[in-house]
Image (spheres, rainbow, N blue to C red):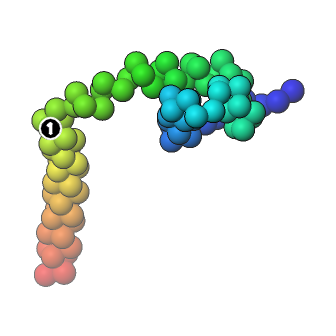
Amino acid sequence: MRSKRKFTPEFKSKVALEALKERESVSELAMKYELHPNQINDWKKEFMANAASVFSKSKTESPSMDDKEKQKLYQVIGQLKVENDFLKKALS
């Protein structure tokens, strides 16, 4: 029994883009990448359904991720400051 193969998002998008270009048939792509044609068609449909999300992301989403990163960094800085103060008191 074959174990389930896992494909990276990069690989899936590459295959979906090739299928959308229609330079080769889905059957030819299936043989080339050793996939079932239905799998390629599913990836192609998923790619098309989610393509609009690439352009719909607002610029406000990116800073919120930066805020989370800043919070983590401030937390680490605070912890290091407490440890530093403790060590200074221990030495004096």
Percent across and percent down for residue 37 are: 68, 22
Along the line of sight, which residue is nearer the eye, 61 or 32? 32
Image: 75 above or below 24: below
Task: Judge left or right: residue 36 versus residue 48.
Answer: right
Percent across and percent down for residue 85 are: 14, 69
Asked if one can make out residue 69 in the rendered structure from this viewpoint, the answer is: yes
Kindly give the residue lying farthest to the right in the view shown: 1
Task: Judge left or right: residue 40 versus residue 51.
Answer: right
Image: 45 above or below 16: above
Q: Could you say which quadrant of the image residue 61 lies in?
A: top left
Kindly give the residue lying farthest to the front in the view shown: 23
Residue at 20% x, 55% y is 73
Along the line of sight, which residue is nearer the eye, 72 or 53? 53
Asked if one can make out residue 16 in the rendered structure from this viewpoint, the answer is: no
Residue at 57% x, 19% y is 42
**Where's the N terminus, which quadrant?**
top right
Residue type, mark 1 in image: Lys
Percent across and percent down for residue 65 are: 21, 41
SS label for mark 1? loop
Residue at 67% x, 33% y is 29
Within 10 Å of disc 1 (Cα), the crowding (few <14, some 14-19, many 20+) is few
Percent across and percent down for residue 25 are: 65, 27
Residue at 16% x, 54% y is 74
Q: Which residue is mark 1?
A: 59
Image: 6 above or below 89: above
Task: Judge left or right: residue 9 versus residue 38.
Answer: left
Image: 80 above or below 20: below
**Where's the C terminus, which quadrant?**
bottom left
Q: How many discs appear? A: 1
